[in-house]
């Protein structure tokens, strides 16, 4: 996952299936304004709790956007001047919820089910996956819709050799105890995780987690 080399930047192809930039024009209180936006896919994210071992199931993966955010001040216009000893790719390996884009015309809960199997290796029926709520992400750039789901899995739901992503994805599945999860939300933490991850963890700890032992 962290064997990253030959980093460089290039223009966004017009036929990108994931991101489409455009300018939004409007008039507010009689003043003409504009805002640069990105059209992206809506998405699902899933809080997964293994009740057999009382563990939350998360994923780790290298995120180019996070890496760019870390090195942008020193990278140069083409990205080739990055000091990779100072900025090893491991800095941009994020801890996240299982998640995926909505890119097919099926119920979102079924997309969530597919992601749980493809990324984390648990095969559960859609009926066991609970929809929690929907919210807007990237409100300054895309305003895309994400729906949070929750599912409880057991060791017996695990499919041998499943998980880790599909095609060219490189995803590491990790498990956190309840105490480890609580520490993620401690004051002063600096995480590479997205807000949706922290929201999902806090939702679980508030609404579904077994009480902490005295």
Image (cartoon, rainbow, N blue to C red):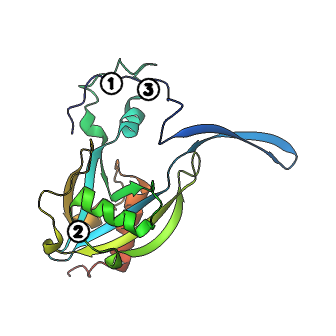
Q: Secondary structure at mark 3?
A: loop
**Residue at position x 11%, y 61% in the image:** 160
Q: Which residue is mark 1?
A: 7
Inspect this view and state whether residue 122 appears. yes
Q: Which of the two discs, 1 and 3, labels the residue nearer the N terminus?
A: 1
Q: Residues within 10 Å of mark 1 (few under 14, many from 20)?
A: few
Q: Residues within 10 Å of mark 3 (few under 14, many from 20)?
A: few
Q: Secondary structure at mark 1?
A: loop
Judge by depth and name the residue closer to the eye, 162 or 63. Answer: 162
Q: Secondary structure at mark 2?
A: loop
**Residue at position x 21%, y 39% in the image:** 1
> Does residue 130 appear to the left or right of 163 in the view shown?
right
> Does residue 29 appear to the left or right of 212 in the view shown?
right
Which of the two marks, 3 or 2, is nearer to us in this view? 2
Q: Which mark is residue 123?
A: 2
Q: CA distance from mark 1 to mark 3?
A: 15 Å
Q: Which mark is residue 73?
A: 3
Q: Which of the two discs, 2 and 1, labels the residue nearer the N terminus?
A: 1
Q: Quadrant of the C terminus?
A: bottom left
Where 155 sits versus 4, above or below?
A: below
């Amino acid at each position: 996952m962290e064997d990253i080399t030959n980093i460089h930047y290039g223009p966004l192809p017009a036929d990108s299936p994931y991101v489409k930039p455009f300018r939004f024009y409007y008039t507010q209180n009689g003043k003409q304004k504009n805002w640069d936006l990105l059209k992206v896919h809506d998405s699902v994210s899933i809080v997964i709790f293994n009740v057999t071992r009382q563990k939350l199931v998360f994923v780790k993966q290298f995120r180019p956007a996070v890496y760019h955010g870390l090195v942008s001040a020193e990278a140069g216009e083409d990205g080739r001047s990055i000091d990779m000893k100072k900025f090893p790719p491991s800095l941009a390996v994020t801890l996240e919820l299982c998640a995926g884009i909505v890119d097919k015309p099926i119920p979102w809960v079924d997309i969530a089910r597919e992601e749980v199997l493809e990324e984390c290796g648990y095969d559960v029926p859609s009926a066991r996956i609970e929809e929690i709520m929907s919210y807007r992400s990237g409100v300054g750039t895309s305003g895309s819709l994400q729906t949070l789901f929750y599912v409880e899995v057991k060791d017996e739901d695990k499919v041998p050799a499943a998980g880790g992503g599909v095609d060219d994805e490189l995803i590491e599945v990790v498990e956190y105890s309840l105490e480890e999860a609580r520490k993620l939300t401690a004051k002063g933490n600096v995480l590479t995780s997205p807000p949706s991850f922290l929201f999902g963890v806090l939702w679980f700890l508030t609404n579904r987690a077994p009480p902490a032992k005295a």
